[in-house]
């Protein structure tokens, strides 16, 4: 959502209109967390984490949260949300990610190590998996390869960051998914789209997934 963004009401209204089962808000500080609590009537299950800088987040779900964990990934030990949800088709695992943005060898290596750690972790999950957030990597980046090797798919190439620019607009916000191990292709994405301008330099990503 970007901590400097103050268009709280628009974000809440858009979520209510779109009505996803789960929603992950990266770059959410304490102010954003407070404003987003208006959604709690429709989303009774939530996780809030007020991290340093732009690395906080808020997660809302209509599905019961069975357990939650905020893992520290990469050399900077940045947070990664991992929750198990009780879905109609069985238990599913959701990850909310936001690695360090690339920029020079050290920052790029940090992003890559974060995403590799997420890929290694989710490869051990016994059920369906969804990984969503600001990956700070395009689909063709080598940083994404471990996730795809682990069976995730579903990313698109519609620009999500700096979408208003004809030069710098790139797809770095993704919603990836995988069916249970042994049946990874059992999960299907029926629809995928990029949402409207809600005041952030990123656009939201929405997908309808079933398995």
Image (cartoon, grey):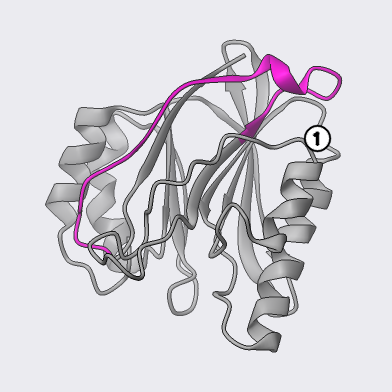
Q: Does 3 sit left or right of 211 as displayed? A: left
The quadrant of the image that shows the C terminus is top right
Q: Quadrant of residue 62?
A: top left
Instruction: Tell me which residue sits at (36%, 61%) in the image.
Output: 161
Count of numbered marks: 1
Q: Position of residue 119 (x, y in %)?
A: 77, 50
User: In the rendered view, would you say 185 is above or below 158?
Assistant: above
- Evaluate whether residue 8 shows in this view: yes
Instruction: Tell me which residue sits at (49%, 78%) in the image.
Output: 52
Q: Quadrant of residue 61?
A: top left
Q: Quadrant of residue 34?
A: bottom left
Q: Does 209 sit left or right of 18 as displayed? A: right
User: In the rendered view, would you say 157 is above or below 181?
Assistant: below
- The residue lying furthest to the front in this view is 167
Q: Position of residue 202 (x, y in %)?
A: 33, 60
Q: Relative to the observer, which residue lies in front, 118 or 146?
A: 146
User: In the rendered view, would you say 18 is above or below 194?
Assistant: above
Element under disc 1: loop
* Magenta residue check for 78: no
Q: Position of residue 143 (x, y in %)?
A: 70, 62
Q: Which residues are magenta?
A: 177-200
Instruction: Tell me which residue sits at (46%, 66%) in the image.
Output: 56
- Evaluate whether residue 73 shows in this view: no
Q: Position of residue 190 (x, y in %)?
A: 47, 18
Q: Which residue is mark 1?
A: 125
* Magenta residue check for 197: yes
């Amino acid at each position: 959502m970007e901590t400097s963004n103050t268009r709280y009401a628009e974000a809440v209204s858009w979520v209510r209109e779109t009505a996803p089962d789960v929603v992950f808000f990266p770059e959410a500080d304490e102010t954003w967390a407070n404003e987003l609590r208006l959604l709690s009537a429709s989303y009774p299950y939530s996780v809030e984490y007020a991290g340093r800088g732009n690395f906080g987040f808020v997660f809302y779900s209509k599905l019961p949260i069975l357990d939650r964990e905020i893992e520290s990934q990469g050399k900077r030990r940045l947070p990664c949300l991992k929750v198990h949800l009780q879905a109609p088709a069985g238990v599913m695992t959701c990850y909310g990610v936001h690695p360090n943005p690339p920029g020079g060898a050290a920052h790029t290596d940090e992003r890559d190590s974060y995403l590799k750690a997420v890929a290694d972790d989710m490869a051990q999950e016994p059920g369906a998996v969804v990984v969503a957030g600001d990956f700070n990597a395009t689909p063709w980046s080598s940083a994404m390869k471990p996730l795809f090797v682990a069976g995730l798919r579903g990313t698109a190439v519609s620009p999500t960051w700096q979408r208003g620019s004809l030069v710098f607009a790139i797809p770095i916000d993704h919603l990836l998914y995988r069916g249970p191990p042994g049946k990874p292709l059992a999960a299907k994405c029926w629809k995928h789209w990029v949402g409207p301008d809600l005041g952030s330099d990123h656009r939201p990503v929405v997908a309808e997934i079933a398995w």
